[in-house]
Image (cartoon, rainbow, N blue to C red):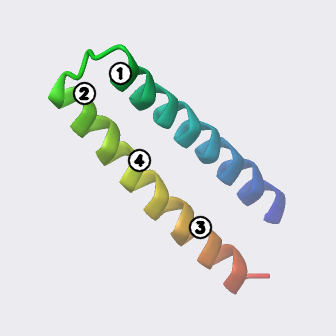
């Protein structure tokens, strides 16, 4: 069970990194479509909350 949590957390971290990269690329290209930026920030916040909850759950169930 612990290994599946680690894999899930690694997957979400990869998703976070790609989301941050996408956001940075938008700023660099000056193609700041405001809705795109808002969607990326929302995804980022949700992902961070999910990771936080998963880490707490994994810690409680060690």
Q: Which residue is mark 3?
A: 54
Q: Secondary structure at mark 1?
A: helix
Q: Are marks 2 and 1 in contact (CB under 8 Å)?
A: yes
The reply, left or right, for residue 38 in relation to residue 20 is left
| Dot label at residue 14 | none
Mark 2 vs mark 3: which is more N-terminal? 2
Instruction: Say which residue label 4 marks.
Output: 44
Disc 2 and disc 3 in contact, CB within 8 angstroms = no
Residue at left 62%, top 76%?
57
Task: Tell me the residue that label 1 is attached to.
Answer: 26
Q: Position of residue 41 (x, y in %)?
A: 32, 44
Q: Circle 4 sits in a helix, a strand or a loop, which is it?
A: helix
| The C terminus, quarter of image | bottom right
First in sequence: mark 3 vs mark 4:
4
Nearer the observer, disc 1 or disc 4?
Answer: 1
Drawn side of residue 31 relative to residue 2, left or right: left
Task: Classify 34 as above or below 11.
Answer: above
Specify the label residue 36 is tagged with.
2
């Amino acid at each position: 069970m612990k290994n599946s949590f680690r894999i899930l957390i690694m997957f979400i971290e990869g998703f976070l990194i790609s989301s941050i990269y996408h956001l940075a690329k938008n700023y660099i290209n000056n193609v700041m479509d405001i809705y795109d930026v808002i969607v990326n920030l929302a995804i980022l916040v949700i992902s961070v909350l999910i990771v936080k909850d998963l880490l707490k759950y994994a810690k409680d169930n060690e």
